[in-house]
Amino acid sequence: MALKRKIAYIDLTNRTVKTASIPIELRKKFLGGRGLDMYLLYNHMEPGADALGPGNVALVSAGLLVGTLASASARIHLAGKSPLTGFIGSANCGGFFAPEMRLAGFDHLVIKGKADKPVYLWIHNGDIEIRDAGHLWGHNAQDSQTLIREELGDDDIQSLTIGVAGENLVRFSCVMTSMKNAAGRTGIGAIWGSKNLKAVAARGTMDIGIAHPEEALDYNKEIITQVTSAKVSKTMQKLGTMFIWGTTNTTGLVRVRNFQSNQIPHADDIEPESIEEEMIGTAGCFGCQVHCRGRYFIKGGPYSGTYAEGPEYTSLGAFGAEVGCTSKQTVLVGNHLVNSYGMDTLETGSMIAWAMELFEKGILTEKDTNGLDLSFGNNDAVIEAVNQIAHREGIGDILAEGPLRAAEKIGQNSIQYLIHVKGMSNLHSDERPTPALSLNIATASRGADHLRSRPAIDLYHLPEKVLRKIFGNPVPYDGPLTSDFRDYEGKPWEVIWQEMCYGAVDCLGICKYHTVFLGPNMPNFDEWSKLIYLNTGLELSPKDIWDSAERCYTLEKLFNLREGQTRDMDWLPDRYFDEPTDKGLPVVRGRSIDREKFTKMIDEYYKLHEWDKKGIPKKAKLESLGLNNEPSHQL
Amino acid sequence: MSESTKKNTDKKTVKGRTSGQFRCLYCFKRITAPPGAKSTTCPHCGYAWRISWFSPGEPRIRGPVWENNEAMTRKIMAESKGGSK
Amino acid sequence: MSKILVIDHEKCTGCRLCELVCSVKHERVSNPYRARIKIVKWEMAGKIIPVVCQQCEDAPCMGVCPVNALSRNAETGAVEIDYDVCIGCRMCMNACPFGAMGYDWVNSHVIKCDLCGGDPQCARFCETGAIQYVEKATLGALKQRKGAAALAEVMTKVSTAYSEAG
Ligand code: SF4
Ligand SMILES: [Zn+2]
């Protein structure tokens, strides 16, 4: 059955591999994926370890439902202590690696120590081998996958790889699989690079048992209909996540020129529909019918004829609005480059945008940039900056350090222009008109992060009745809930609900586009409960799943506290309070966040979580979640 | 194969989903655009939108008609109907 | 009326759901490598090609079978294997020009698409329409329409260019 998979402990220093079974109690408590990763991180990393030292751990986890008849259950979760923030390092991606690792017999890898020279792991039907990766070092993320397939003579091998950015310890480098699937945020690629770990390759042919095959087939079909009949899915099938950028630029909720504005008018060339003209179609992750990933060939310029996938929402900001560019060629090339270097597109674009504002303000000059003209809108300079960051050349070497370290190096008042929380840059969206979304980025465990708790449907003007139905399940809630996204009241609960919603699917290995992220009618706790039962035979109620997600989130909080996080870090950059939005529709124009109301919001958020005023989970809460004895070293 | 022996391949229809329409991003009312239209003005509020069709019967807002909407927004803001909250 | 699986590789997004549901339907487990259909990819070049039995009229696998273990199901039109007769020589695998005859190492026998007895799961789950189960009688019309659509596009371009040129 699906749960017969194992965990492996790999010590790269001593080159040993041990395997163990996973106790069913831990499965029920943490499900898998991000949930068990957080358990493993809390248990296996020495407190205070250097994120780029051998004391950090590199974790790889498949979600509980990966490879089963749960639609879009393709996510692999990666974790460790973030080299970017020093707090939770956590990221996941789709593609085809997660099911392959499961077919090869493993659900979780705990990778420790540091190899004396480049290595990769080869996982095959219950076996794990540490192999030399000298010949892969220096290759980009995609070529490395091809080279492994060639070396081992099997085209069905799926690999997680780092590109040169990870090798060069760029603090926001990713782990990649396939063309563009990236476990993008918090710099997991640099952890791998610091361990001399170039790749993890998997190929397996071991059955994943399905508890109730016929019913699971029928139910999968039902879920697919539920998901694909939503307008948001139909839009994504054509435009991918780019559509969100189009819609939010129309409203006035994007970041422009490092957050100096919230809308970029007349940017026709980078509108999703314009970029879609370059697409040859879309691709899906394992078992997914939303297939949101664009596929294109670059036309013209030095990369002409190159096949690439994407771009997504974030690349439209990163190589478009944020850097003041409105050329789709820059977006398409920039997107391709970050994917081949294995670098977080969001952080890359943010760092360049920030440097451009410093350049504009005279804090950086051509002397600092070796003559690189970092003026907003300079397409060539953006591409050159991407190259410099990946290779740590020139100004790129400083930018590769991520927001806070770079600001420290550049000095003056450069830190003021960073749009970050806890040392991680924010999505290229503007949350000043939306207190709920502001609270989301201020409190998220990874730093400024839309994928931990964004109540995006808060923007949809849904009637209170609908909101009550969504946010009142599976845990009853009778506090305020309002349809107006400008409100402060009631929003903390939306953020918490969304934390559990995203936490749940991150534990199950399901994609967030199959949740109440962008569509209110998407599958939810009830559906997941049924999916778990039909596929694995485990009987977990919707509330049980919620509890697992809450355990996961609470462990992240405990980890962050252990690594020195304080209440003042749950906060926004000054610009959110001091500089009102200057563009967009009337509802979003002239808006900023109110410090006092926002403080109250955070208080309320802590209270609902049963955390104290400092954001520390109360003892009773830990007991009720069964987390009072962590680290418990059961795995 | 006779129809009776064919197994029932399910077609679950989902209620409450609309197609052929989109919501105005200013007033949030539903607008029906003429098939294939490249832009349309909201009959309820006057904001004008450029339209794209992600499938033959499914329109979405591609972007604003910039000048029209900017002028309207300025007017509304001047009358402070933007609503401070 | 007889139906057939039609593959439009241009519509395939490479998600491999067909492999997954095929393995569950036939083997009661999830194992894409035990499916009767395979999505072959040249991933880094962006090429995706589904491979499945064509149920050939003059089937090479049937022709080459030394013990006549392969026969056509009169109702569905699928070429099916009689495992009681099959001797496991795998000549059919060699003969099939598409590689659609697979091998299941668990049960040590060849496997192939049997159209799920008339409700092929791959087509049922393929939302993009890359795999469709259609009446043989409409097969030609489908292709004609696709060809005509491409032509129509060219014609529009030509006429626009003509009118723009003035
Ligand atoms: S919606 Fe997109 S990212 Fe999510 S599983 Fe489907 S193809 Fe992958
Ligand atoms: Zn309107």
Image (cartoon, coloured by chain):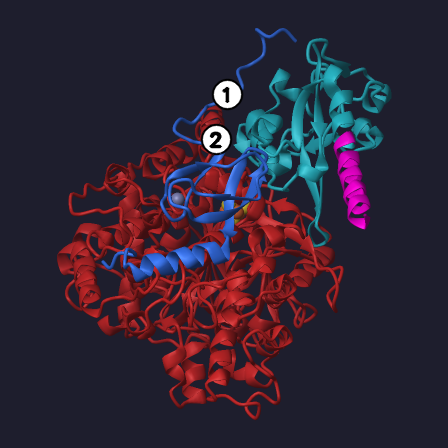
Chain colours: A red, B blue, C cyan
State the residue position of label 2: A225
* Residue at 58% over, 12% down: B6
The C terminus of chain A, quarter of image: bottom left
Q: Is residue A290 magenta?
A: no
- As displayed, is residue A273 above or below residue A18? above
The reply to whether dot 1 and dot 2 touch (C-beta < 8 Å) is: yes
The percent coordinates of residue A371 (x first, y second) are: 62, 89
Q: Residues within 10 Å of mark 1 (few under 14, many from 20)?
A: few
Q: Judge by depth and name the residue closer to the eye, B46 or C19.
A: B46
State the residue position of label 1: B10
The percent coordinates of residue A108 (x first, y second) are: 46, 54
Taken as a whole, is the magenta stretch helix, strand or loop?
helix
| Residue stretch rendered in magenta on the structure | C148-166
**Left or right placement of residue C89 versus residue A619 in this view:** right
The yes-or-no answer for disc 1 within 8 Å of ligand 1 is no
Q: Chain of mark 1?
A: B
Image quadrant where residue A537 sits:
top left
Mark 2: amino acid: Thr
**Left or right placement of residue A621 versus residue A583 in this view:** left
Q: Is residue C156 magenta?
A: yes
Whether residue C114 is visible here, answered yes or no, is no
Q: Judge by depth and name the residue closer to the eye, A65 or A604.
A: A604
